[in-house]
Each structure stands twice: as structure tokens, then as C-alpha cells.
Image (cartoon, helix red, strand yellow):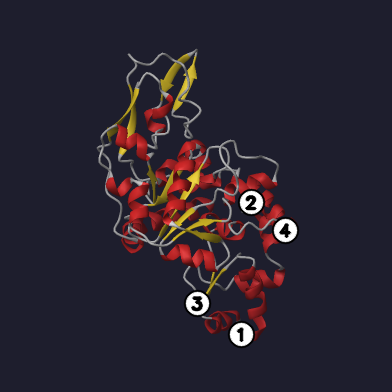
Amino acid sequence: MSDKLIRLIVHCFTPEQAEAASHLPFYLPQPLAKIARKAGKAPAEIQPALDALAARKIILKTRKGYSLLPLIPGMFERVLINGADSDWHKKYSELLLDLYSTGYVREYNRTAIPLVRNLPVQKAVEAQNRVATADLVSETIGCHQEFAIANVCQCRQSMRFIGKDCKRARPEDGCLIFGSYAKMSAEGGNARMVDRQEMKEAVAERFEKKLVFFTANIAPENANAICTCCDCCCHFVESVNNWNGKAGIAPAHFLARIDQSLCDDCGKCLKPCNTLAHLMEKKKHRFFAERCIGCGNCLSSCKNAAISLVENPSYKPPAAGFRALGIKSFPAISLTGIKVRLRRD
């Protein structure tokens, strides 16, 4: 709890809405009647407040009822992904960015919980004659018939609101969405449907912009979304670079390796790297393997072919689906939550 968090809460909730929301379950929706009983009120008394919050995407509303969402990822994405740019949305972005910059998320990054995985640059993997079917974007595209692109990238949109434009991409370069999630997102006004060819072109363009492809750590045949992230706007990359956010990333299938005998210290690999794995110190190139996430963006920048991809012995195939991922991750997530609560108490 902090003044910055309180300011964000006050912006999102009126006192009446906050009182109603305090009786909501976390994430899994409950019927209005059950929520009203917990609040000691008639359903008609609290429904207007809940519906107003749901209309702004502050809380989740489904056919099953209402629930609270995590701040990020969760509420943040839902509030901004449709491209809304009212004064309220701009203030929301300002307050959330101010809160996130405190680095509170480091409290949740003390335990390795591989919920997210990186999809490497396809050309980089193919050029090295590597086989990584489940880890290539082409495999995800091939598994689905429905595709959509989110109206905006919520991270780049929020940064634009505070006057900081992305160095690599546009706010309109939103998440890539596949399967039933694509249709659902488009019907909700958060994305536009595209065909397979347009999705392939979008992927190629994002790779050219040296973005990092993050997705849920599940097999490619599942409905899913891919965030195309950058080091200047993306909060997950910010967490990786500053607050041990790599604890949330599954070990990559491949990692970069440097042949120092071929490196001429030109420094051209620094710009495409989003995670500060390549740095120059006293005009000499240094590679920090522990920061590498295996994206492969740096390979094409090296004219001397001093960078290659090597198999990561720690790699494990993605989970079969969200249910399997949740079951596998639940013990570590629960333990992390308990530890954070105890530290705060």
C-alpha cells in the first residue's frame, strides 16, 4: 500500500464502486446474487456500480458474473487495448506508470514461475539449421484459422499518453491474437480480424522492428496471444531488465553464443537487444549470457557471424494448455503470494 496505489484506486473507483468491488472474488467470476448476499444488499443496489466498473474494464464481467482482475497483467491491458484515449484513460496511464516505476513487482519475481515464453526470430533459427517447431511463430499461425490484431499495444499507448514515443514501433502495433481469442477480442471492440497472410506480414514487420515475441507458455495449438514487446515501453521487458522479471520466463530453446575470435567490437548488436545482454565497456564488446532470452534479434546485426544460437540444456517444451500450466504453476504462485503477504505484514 502506498500513496501512488491509493491515487490509482481513487481514480478507478468511486466510494460506492469500491464498496461493491470489495465483495468480488479474485479472477473467477461469481453471480450477482452471491456477490449481493456477501455485501448484505439487494442485487439491484450494487449492480449499477459493478456494471459501471465493467464498462470501463476495471473489473471483469462475463455470463457467469463479476470478478476482480490483477492490476497488470489484467486490468491494465483491458482498459487500454481498445485504443480509447479520453482524459480519464490518459490519467489512468499516468498513475499506473508512476506506480509500476516503483518496482513493486520485484516482490513477485523471487521464485521462478515459467508462465511466459519467448518465440525467437524465425529466420535466425532457420539460418542456424535448428529445429524448434513449437517455438516458432509460423507453427502458431499454422495451427489456427482465426486471427486478429489488437487495436493498440497498451504499453506503447500508455507511454504515448505521457509524451514518450516508442523507439521501435507504433502504438497501433498491438498484440497478435489467435484462435477463439481472436474472434472474442474483435467482437469486444478490442481488435480487428485479419487473414492468415496479413498476420504473416505483421509478424515479419515486427521482427524487422526488433521486437521481442512473448506468449503464454503453452503449446501453439491453443488459443493465445503474442505480445510484441520493446525495451522502451513494455513493462514486462522493464521488469526483466530491472526487477528480475526473467523469473517469469521459461528457459529459451536457444541462447546466443559469442565467438570472441570473430567479434570486432563494432557494437552493432547493442541496438537490437532489448534485454541489455550486449554492452560496450571501454570500447570492448561484452556479452551477459544471464540476460539473454534467446530472441535471436542480434544475429542479423553481426556482419562477422560472431553470434550463433546454441541449444539451451534447461529448455522444456511448453505446457499442453492453460489448465496444465495453471496446475504446474499453482504451488509456486501460491507460495509467492503467501511470502509477499507475510513480508508486507
Name which residue lies at 66% across and 72% down. Answer: 52
Position in image of residue 260 (x %, y %): 34, 16
Residue for badge 2: 96
Residue for badge 4: 88
Residue for badge 1: 43
Residue for badge 3: 30
Mark found first going from the N terminus, 4 or 3: 3
Whether residue 109 can be seen here? no
Mark found first going from the N terminus, 3 or 2: 3
Asked which secondary structure carries label 1, the reply is helix
Mark found first going from the N terminus, 3 or 1: 3
Which residue in the rendered view is the most extreme toward the right? 87
Q: Nearer the viewer, mark 2 or mark 4?
A: 4
Asked which secondary structure carries label 3, the reply is loop
Position in image of residue 173 (x %, y %): 55, 48
In what quadrant of the picture does the N terminus appear?
bottom right
Question: Quick check: 59 left or right of 137?
Answer: right
Mark found first going from the N terminus, 4 or 1: 1
